[in-house]
Image: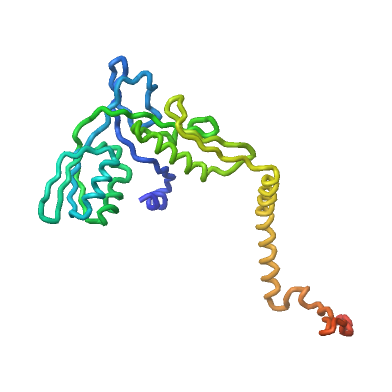
Amino acid sequence: MQERLEREFGLNLITTAPSVRYRITRVTGEVIEVDSPAKFPNPSDISKIEEPIIKAMIITNDESVGGILQLCQDKRGTQKGFEYLSPTRVMLTYELPLNEIVLDFYDRLKSVSRGYASLDYHLAGYSESDLVKLDVLVGGEPVDALSMICHREQSYERGRDLVSRLRKLIPRQMFEVPIQAAIGSRVIARETVAAIRKKRAGQVLRRRHHAQTQTPRKTKRRQETHEARRPGGHPARSLPRRPKSDIHGRRRVMFWPRQTSLS
């Protein structure tokens, strides 16, 4: 879909993580709905946070029940029903947070059940939950595009995983680049992109200079090769070869042909 929109309509699309609407009650009693971490209010102004809940019904075979139960537990689900529809078919009923479903739940469900599972769900209202805003700071500056809203129990694991991935993606500089995951003013995970050493910096600069000068050199070589393959050849190919030495290392005596000009 993204490639088709870019090709047919010339749009520059930005892919972002899916989000849901959270219902936040301030200490003043005002109720607001937030669908982005950038709109998340200050934690000191929040009285409670409610997230949307769904009622999910999963039908699968009895061989995949164990993996699906573990998956629903990892997604903060609450089991509401367990029923055998036949000797080999099971229907599981769960209440799950909607923000845990929209990202990768369906793909993981198909992977765990090897494709033999179906999912049906509908909204079941809102439920109060202990949610926090996880900020990512690069070089001490917050990056809004990397912020997320997650459960407090999962904040450390997700923050640690996020900063470790960023450390591998951010290129090294002449100075250290700290990458931090924080909840409010408290840092819960940190990684550091090490600075390039002086010797290493010289190598990097030489490689960059070599890469910049390599392109015109390659173009020149291609032109020379093309000219040499044309009828008549390159002027250097018409020069006589130097005499080669024999097996005893002595130079062979050869007379250079006289250059004659055509009148």
* 84 relative to 243, above or below: above
How far across and how far down the image is residue 78, in percent?
21, 37
> Image point 52% across, 37% down: which residue?
191
Q: Residue furthest front?
A: 66
Q: Is residue 194 above or below residue 220?
A: above
200 vs 95, left or right, is right
Give the camera-side residue of 130 and 203: 130
Q: How is the image coloured?
A: rainbow
- Most extreme residue toward the top is 28
Q: Quadrant of the C terminus?
A: bottom right
User: Vertically, is 219 above or below 241?
Assistant: above
Q: Is residue 263 visible?
A: no
In-front residue for pair 11/125: 125
**How many numbered discs, if any?**
0
The image shows residue 171 at horizontal and vertical percentages of 57, 44
Q: Position of residue 104 (x, y in %)?
A: 32, 46
Q: Residue at x 66, y 66 (%)?
A: 222
Which image quadrant is residue 71 in? top left
Residue 72 seen from this side: yes
Instruction: Give the image location of residue 108, x and y in percent.
Output: 30, 49
What residue is drawn where x is 17% and y is 50%? 59
Drawn side of residue 33 relative to residue 78, left or right: right
Q: Residue at x 53, y 30 (%)?
A: 140
Q: Is residue 243 left or right of residue 98?
A: right
Left or right of 48: which side holds 158?
right
Residue pushed farthest left?
A: 86
